[in-house]
Amino acid sequence: MKRWIMALVAANLVGIVALAFAYPDPMLGPGALIPAHASLATDCFACHAPMQGAVEARCTSCHAVGDIGLRTVAGTPLAHSTPMPPFHQGLADSDCMGCHTDHPLASLVPAHSHTFAHSMLTPLAGAACSGCHAAPKDTLHAGISAECSTCHKQTDWAAATIDHSRFFALTGPHGAACTSCHTTANDFSKFTCFNCHEHQETDLIRKHLEEGIRNIDNCVACHRDTHTEGGEGREGDGGDDD
């Protein structure tokens, strides 16, 4: 009796496995493939390995990482209506299923959000912002060739980390380009106030000498904005006799 039951169970298992191979969609219910992979609908092992599920190695056997976003699997250059940066080449891990599933309505696989995070990139790729992002076409960015990370963070692209009011408030007619004051390429720690018609160096030296101030190299030590005549650092910064 027991042998008969064992034989029946074994036969059922064999039948289920056979049906799974013969009719994978109704038996496993993963949902239809995405249109681009419709030709693989009857070839589960094109993506899946036995007892492992979908594996990255089978994805990259067709989709060469170096070509993703640039060329089709046949090597034809892609023409995007909206250019897509080829960021896959800079991913730290080749976890294809972390973002993609070929069965959009699959009920037997975890849900995928298809979201991108800069933390997925290698440090080198993450630092090369211009590889994916084009600089805004405005006067503020026109004179800056430094990497975007000089002012921006990857967690909030819209907000810059430089608060100019902490150093020198640009009040009044000070809507000039950054390079008007920061003349050293990409080094915003250096500045000069001698590029404006109201701040001619010879006139400023003469006026400050009348007040006993000999050193005027560090304007912001005394002047915190365009309306400040002097500040706390005036005496110590300018009163040396040499």
Image (cartoon, rainbow, N blue to C red):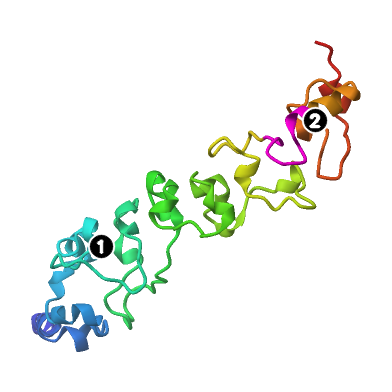
- Give residue 239's mark: none
Is 37 rendered above or below residue 176? Answer: below
Instruction: Name the amino acid, label 1.
Output: Ile
The part of the image, by quadrant, that contains residue 230 is: top right
Check contact, mark 1 vs mark 2: CB within 8 A: no
Front in this rendered view, residue 12 or 131: 131
Dot 2: element: helix
Q: Position of residue 186 (x, y in %)?
A: 54, 39
Q: Position of residue 217 (x, y in %)?
A: 73, 26
Location of mark 1 (residue)? 68
Side (left or right) of 155 relative to 85: right
- What type of secondary structure mainly makes up the magenta span? loop
Q: Position of residue 105 (x, y in %)?
A: 33, 83
Disc 2: CA contacts within 10 A as few (<14), some (14-19) or many (>=20): some
- Whole-Å distance between the Cαs marked 1 and 2? 59 Å
Q: Is residue 133 magenta?
A: no
Location of mark 2 (residue)? 204
The part of the image, by quadrant, that contains residue 22 is: bottom left
Front in this rendered view, residue 54 or 126: 126
Is 162 rendered above or below residue 81? Answer: above
Report the residue at 17% width, 83% height from top: 24
Instruction: Name the amino acid, label 2.
Output: Leu
Side (left or right) of 218 relative to 86: right
Nearest to N terminus: mark 1 or mark 2? 1
The range drawn in magenta is 192-202
Extreme bottom residue here? 26
